[in-house]
Image: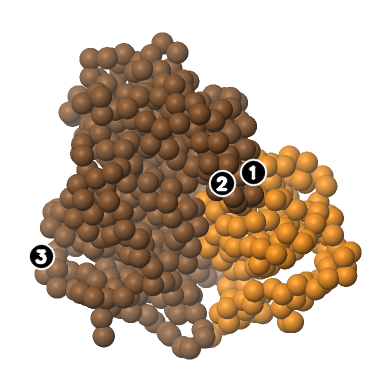
Amino acid sequence: MTETLFEKIWNSHIVVERENEPSLIYIDRHLIHEVTSPQAFDGLRVNQRNVRRPDLTVATIDHNVPTTDRSLPMIDETSSTQIQTLEKNCKDFGIKLFGINDPNQGIVHVIGPQLGITLPGSTIVCGDSHTSTQGAFGAFAFGIGTSEVEHTLATQTLWLEKPKTFEILATGKRKNSFAITSKDIILSIIKQIGTDGGTGHVLEYRGDAISDLSMEQRMTICNMSIEAGSRAGLIAPDEKTFDYLNNRKYTPKNYDELVDDWKNNLMSDPNSKFDKSFIIDVDKIEPQVSWGTNPAMVSDVTGKIPTPEEFGQNNEIQIESAKKALLYMDLKPDTAIVDIPIDRVFIGSCTNARLEDLKDAAEIVKGKTVNSDVSAMVVPGSQMVKLEAEKLGLDKIFKDANFEWRESGCSMCLGMNPDILKPGERCASTSNRNFEGRQGSGGRTHLVSPVMAAASAIAGHFVDVREWC
Amino acid sequence: MIGNVIKYEQDNIDTDVIIPGTYLKIHDYNELATHAMEGLDPDFPSKVKDGDFIVAGKNFGCGSSREHAPIALSTCGIKAVIATSFARIFYRNSVDGAFLLPIEVDDETYHKIANSDQLEINIEKNEIKNITKNETYAIKPFSEIIAKIIAAGGLFKYKK
């Protein structure tokens, strides 16, 4: 019987499986951060339980941290308390923590792969929806809530309903592989399958257009799988995957042996059956810009803001949602995307703040200056990314162009630390969600790739970055 | 279970409007509840009554994994969210912590239920009785798996 990659990973992690019951699935790696873990540790204490496998659990602090000078005391007391709580919990339960001043601190989904904690064929959970990022390594990686965090801490297992499988076949070749990025591919996919197109499914991205991508680009695609409602995103590992993970801090000692095993096993069998399929031809993809308040409300950069009727296509609820989105975004139908002026630019987040993202953005910015009406910032995904970027002189390129160069963290992706939009401000953002208020109450978010964000920062409005390179 | 409806005629009600990110630092549930639905309906905490139900369109609770979302709604008194579909993490969070019931209905039912209607939800019979309109609607049954977790009273009480 043929099996998909997901089914192989699932089947190799079953602890208990009975008909009409959830399956008890073993968890190989549990990543935790300060926001979704405090109540889980409270629960352990109340019930006098221990962490079953502290050696398979790793913590960092990313959501709340200030991205400014960390030698200064934190101003926000509640953030400070939440961070201290995680520090205490990790100490009490013997969990490795990459704390606020650790050189390995960073966004949890950025440091997992960077440290070699993320491994092909494994099951990985974190109390964070963008855990799907790590599916780029051929792992079943998915976000969970705090009750499931507690359950994983206590048992290293989870009761799960088996998701269905969804093949996304990406064919063709990007017309300009610098200007048209994996961010544009995933935004195009979400635009077409919708914000709930993947609900109940694990998406497996396949095809030449996926193999063509670097590991960092693949992570961007898997990261945003959750924005299509899916359980996880998955890409079969290949030589690029094995090279990326070689010689990382926590890469296992028997790595070569593991690679041999992965090469033989971690792929969907020929002719394996997926519950759903979708084909996208990347030849046709242009740089994308979101115009609305969910990640399916997206346009080609050469396009115009649609009328609610064009967007909704006879679906009354969709038409109303587009009207509401345009009102919130203060945009009028038929406005050319390139005519939309911006106030802020945010290059950061678990979607697009890895070294390649910063290198590509710097390539656009080099020798130019941010438009005088725009305030722009770069927030590296981890302190390691920051250090590597500084070795390449990228910080100087950004600072010379009037970008702020910050310490790593989630920052303006979700508005939990002081990095937020003011009401009414319009931001070109490399993050993942353009929900109302996501980057600060009343803030207006347009999702774009790092090169699109960089070029728009210089121009002061959206531009077609293909004309810049 | 009897309660009154607060209806939002919208799809994709996301966790950032249910409980904006800035409040995820709050540890106290009662304080969290004062910000429930703030991104969509700032009057929500003052108008919601214990036992009320939220009715909305598809993909309710999309976005972040924050369990703060069902916790904030439940602490305000919401006993069920009735929607045409749910995002998975919100759905599981609601059930795992026994915070509220995520009830799926079809489009027709969603359109028939109006704001302020009084409903009686019966999950044994898989039906909703609209007391105000004297109508009865079908609930999409929970999977056996989810039904067992609900019957147990949450993930930790679900024992093998």
Residue at 71% x, 78% y is B126
| Callout 3 amino acid | Asp
Q: Compare marks 1 and 3 and give the one earlier in the sequence.
A: 3
Tell me the residue that label 2 is attached to: A312
Position of residue A121 relative to residue A13, above or below, is: above
Q: Compare marks 1 and 2 and give the one earlier in the sequence.
A: 2
Find the distance from the CA under tag 1 to the CA under tag 2: 8 Å
Is label 1 in contact with label 2 (beta carbons under 8 Å)? yes
- Residue A186 seen anywhere in this rendered image of the structure: yes
Q: Dot 1: what SS? A: helix
Q: Position of residue A153 (x, y in %)?
A: 46, 66
Find the distance from the CA under tag 2 to the CA under tag 3: 52 Å
Chain assigned orange: B
Report the front residue among B152 and A83. Answer: B152
| Callout 1 amino acid | Glu
Report the front residue among A102 and A279. Answer: A279
Q: Position of residue B157 (x, y in %)?
A: 61, 77
Q: Chain of mark 2?
A: A
Is label 2 in contact with label 3 (beta carbons under 8 Å)? no
Residue A320 has which mark? Answer: 1
- The crowd level at tag 2 (other Cα within 10 Å; few <14, some 14-19, many 20+) is some
Q: Chain of mark 3?
A: A
Quadrant in the picture for residue A278? bottom left
Q: Are marks 1 and 2 on the same chain?
A: yes
| Callout 2 amino acid | Gly
Residue A256 has which mark? Answer: 3
Q: Compare marks 2 and 3 and give the one earlier in the sequence.
A: 3
> Closer to the observer: label 1 or label 2?
2
